[in-house]
Amino acid sequence: MDSRIGVALLFGGRSAEHEVSISSARAVHDNLDPARYRIVCLFINKAGRWRQVPSPHLDPAVLIRGVFQSFLAWDAPGRGLQPKADIFWPVLHGPYGEDGTIQGLLELADVPYVGAGVLGSAAGMDKAVMKDLFRTHGLPIVPYVAIGEAEWSRSPKNVLRRIRAMAKPPMFVKPANLGSSVGITKVKEWTALGPAIETAFLYDRKALVEQGVEGRELECAVLGNDDPEASPPGEIIPSGEFYDYADKYLDGKTGFVIPAKLPAVVEARVRRLAVEAFRACEGAGLARVDFFLEKGTRRLFVNEINSIPGFTEISMYPKLWAAAGTPFPRLVDRLIELGFERHRAKKRRVDRASR
Ligand SMILES: Nc1ncnc2c1ncn2[C@@H]1O[C@H](COP(=O)(O)OP(=O)(O)O)[C@@H](O)[C@H]1O
Ligand SMILES: [Mg+2]
């Protein structure tokens, strides 16, 4: 009998961050102690179909071959995928992974899993909802306007008036639901605003226009459930105009400073705000909270929360914890414990309620 804990890694997925997810899954896989864990690898292809594979290290050309199945029992009665695992770990970034959809499936299956639940995942994925939550909780955010596609096509003039009352170039225009900087434009003059909004609507029916902040980009790692802890922050130094898709995944010229060089009061404030942002968005397990520190004024703004941050060997999240004294293998142990803890707490409540 194998008494090890069965950990199912879910990776790949339908989003633009498919490849990053594979890299993250490889790093998680390599840092799980084989004496303690039995790893089950569930690869999800870009069409959203699943296949159990021996390892995330398979060549991508091999990964995509073979028989894929639907995870929905009603698609394949009696033939659905039946992974034997004690806990599931969605190592998926972006839509259909980080947004509460997979988490909903895992809730329905009533299995323990790593990371935020349905609401926390969904709230962190929608930049408009996330900002509303930040604002409700008194967190500092940049001025922004959320626009619906229908509103934009009906009365662009009204929308532009609302934007003019709130921001001026440079501004950032983004689709509400995406990641990896896809669909994001830095608008440096008013004439570029309309096309930037159109671009954002290619990706989502909701878009955001934000006041641009000139300054430093800081990232802080949060770990825990009810009593989350924040790591010392790190700093991102984008190679181009902003931290865009190419900078994140193609050029690899981004600078990382870990830990960031900051006055003690600023560092303490970032860490406190990171925990507050985590709580505001119903975080669980892990999240990375990103900030802007404005040049000159030293004002701090919360930019966003990522409930499944990049998890490769060189990603900010594990690096921040390693620098804080929790090396990668300890971090994965802790995240698994936190997943079990949440599931146990829920079970206890159900038992109590039904007594
Ligand atoms: N309001 C802003 N001011 C300055 N830079 C911004 C602003 N919004 C976004 N950016 C730049 O664009 C990048 C991506 O935006 P972000 O909102 O983090 O989207 P994503 O979810 O795709 O990472 C940021 O890392 C930053 O470099
Ligand atoms: Mg970001």
Image (cartoon, rainbow, N blue to C red):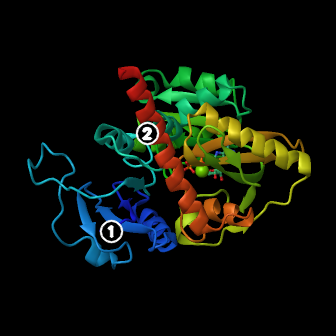
Amino acid found under the numbered disc labelled 1: Asp
Could you tell which of marks 2 and 1 lies nearer the N-terminus?
1
Q: Is residue 45 visible?
A: yes
Task: Determine if the C-beta at disc 2 is less than 8 A from ligand 1.
Answer: no
List x then y, in percent, for residue 300.
Answer: 79, 41
In the picture of the structure, the residue carrying the numbered disc 2 is 201
Task: Judge left or right: residue 186 versus residue 40.
Answer: right
Picture residue at 35% right of the left edge, 45% below the top? 111
Q: Is residue 176 visible?
A: no
Q: Is residue 64 above or below residue 342?
A: below
Q: Quadrant of the C terminus?
A: top left
Q: Residues within 10 Å of mark 2 (few under 14, many from 20)?
A: many
List x then y, in percent, for residue 13.
Answer: 35, 57
Tell me the number on the disc at residue 41.
Answer: none
In the picture of the structure, the residue carrying the numbered disc 1 is 2
Picture residue at 38% right of the left edge, 53% below the top? 88
Q: Secondary structure at mark 1?
A: loop
Picture residue at 69% right of the left edge, 53% below the top? 219
